[in-house]
Image (cartoon, helix red, strand yellow):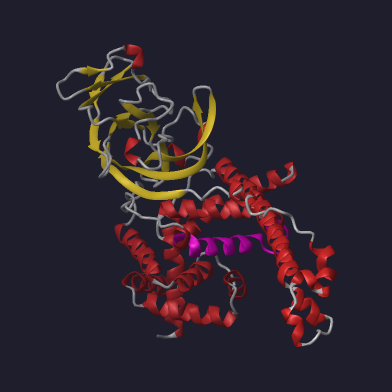
Amino acid sequence: MKNAEAAEFHDFVTARWARLVRTAYLLTGDRHHAEDLTQTTLVRVYQGWNRVRASESPDAYVHKIMVRCNASRFRKRRVTEHLGDPPDNGVADATDQVAHRRALVAALQELPKRQRAVVVLRFWSDLTERETAEVLGCSTGTVKSQTHRALLRLRQHPALIAAAHEELTMGVTNS
Amino acid sequence: MTEHSDDAQQAGLRTLLTGAAEDVLPASAPYDAIVGDARRRIRVRAIGGSALSVVALGAAVAVGVSSFAGGADATRAASGGNGPGAAALTPATSPGAQAAKPQAAPPTTPVAPFAPTSTPAEEPIHYGKTVIAQGVFKGVPWTLARELTKKDGVVVPVPGGETKQTMVFDDTYFVGPNSLRDRGAGGGGTSPDNISALLKHFSYPNADLASSTSVTCLGVGAMDNSWKKENSSPYGISFVSGIVAAKVARVQVVFKDGTTQDATLVAAPADEDGKYFYLPFANQSWHSPGGTLVYYDAQGKVLKPKQDAFSQF
């Protein structure tokens, strides 16, 4: 890699690292796995940096690598996790909201991998249906159906019901 | 469910996902580790590719030999065949085989022996993470965890030079409220077949007594450009930690100002014969205050009594 490309890659990593770790966290449900997954993803990105930077949407390309790395994570390495839940965030926060968020992350992990990826890419990464389809290597129709199924499963979740209720309440209050 | 509530649910989902994701406060990107790993993989792939080429070449030559030896029928069939009796001809007497002879040019020895010498290094094996201890200090929750990884090709200094070995690394780290790895101590290399021999670290003077001793500033990994902010400590908490041999019954931390405190000892995970120790203490600086560690056996006798043999921190 030439110096200019290395500098570009450095800037890319610096700018995207935090966001990618968060995306990985939603995909894995574990903060340590999230760091590992992000690092593995960026190693692959480095290896194919010319392709990534030349692609129409580098971010979508990186998401594609991350989703694939996540899918193969447990196939390649027999990772045994003994690490308990990390301690709560030290910053004071509304207990209910923290509980809801944790419950949602737990509920996400119960979804099939592809449905989970669809939810994360569509509702956290804000990718369009077409972009999501590109990342997952499927049709937009599949993305729609996977989104529908994922939402059907999540909609029964108390955390999401409560969050939706708050959104509705806020909507009523604002109007 | 109505369209309105569907929208609300999707909005709620976005809000929750954003909140959940932002609960994670990542450390600075481990740029050097990423690039180092990528370069290593590229090298391994290049070696693997060369090995594959050699094997492919060997296979091609082997096919050539095979067709030289037994492929006369095919050659003959391609040229129209000579009738049923042709199959009984030996290659040496077959006109077809003679025609193929210049193409084959078989070597007298097989090419395969190249392959084993260029086998790519194996992927690191992760044995998993284990929580060694958890607690709350000055209202701040923390976790001490460790991770074992087996790596190939580790350069180890030995008398008379260096050698590459397969080793197991003990990566001990503290997890603060930011849930980040605040490195306690890397290293602790040992034989891959004996994880319990963590104490035999090649670079520690008290290899039979202690290993991987360090001071960790809790939460410093959560700071942007933490390496530039040498005078700050996010939580004002540091840890002295490390691994000691089973014969050590007490670890006393003697700070430079003369104060002393005993560290807490925790048995190593099952089938390992060492103990982990840790001591949280208030420290507003990123820097270690400095001091020594004194190890005692079960009878209260100081082990390794020479002052200069104690681990400095």
Residue B52 locus on image (x, y percent): 66, 56
Vertical comparison of A97 with B141: above or below: below
Q: Nearer the viewer, residue B172 or B227?
A: B172
Q: Residue B251's image quarter?
A: top left
Q: Nearer the viewer, residue A10 or B21?
A: A10
Q: Is residue B235 above or below residue B34?
A: above
Majority secondary structure in the magenta region: helix
Is residue A65 one of those drawn in magenta? yes
Above or below for A150 versus B176 = below
Quadrant where the N terminus of chain B lies? bottom left
Looking at this view, is B250 or B157 the one in front?
A: B157
Q: Which residues are magenta?
A: A51-74
Tally of marks: 0
Answer left or right for B217 relative to B278. Answer: right
Residue B69, percent from left and from top: 72, 68
Q: Is residue A93 left or right of residue A36?
A: left
Q: Tell me the residue at 44%/76% (across/down).
A: A150
Quadrant of the frame with the C terminus of chain B = top left
Q: Is residue B264 magenta?
A: no
- Could you tell me if residue B103 is visible in this image? yes
Is residue B98 toward the left or the right of residue B17 in the image? Answer: right
Coordinates of residue B264 in the picture (x, y in percent): 23, 32
Look at the picture and state if A157 lies above or below A84.
below
Q: Residue furthest left?
A: B299
Residue A26, visible in the rendered structure: no
Residue B305 at what x, y percent from top left?
Answer: 27, 14
Front one among A131 and B126:
B126
**Where on the picture, by quarter, is residue B190?**
top left
The quadrant where residue B171 appears: top left
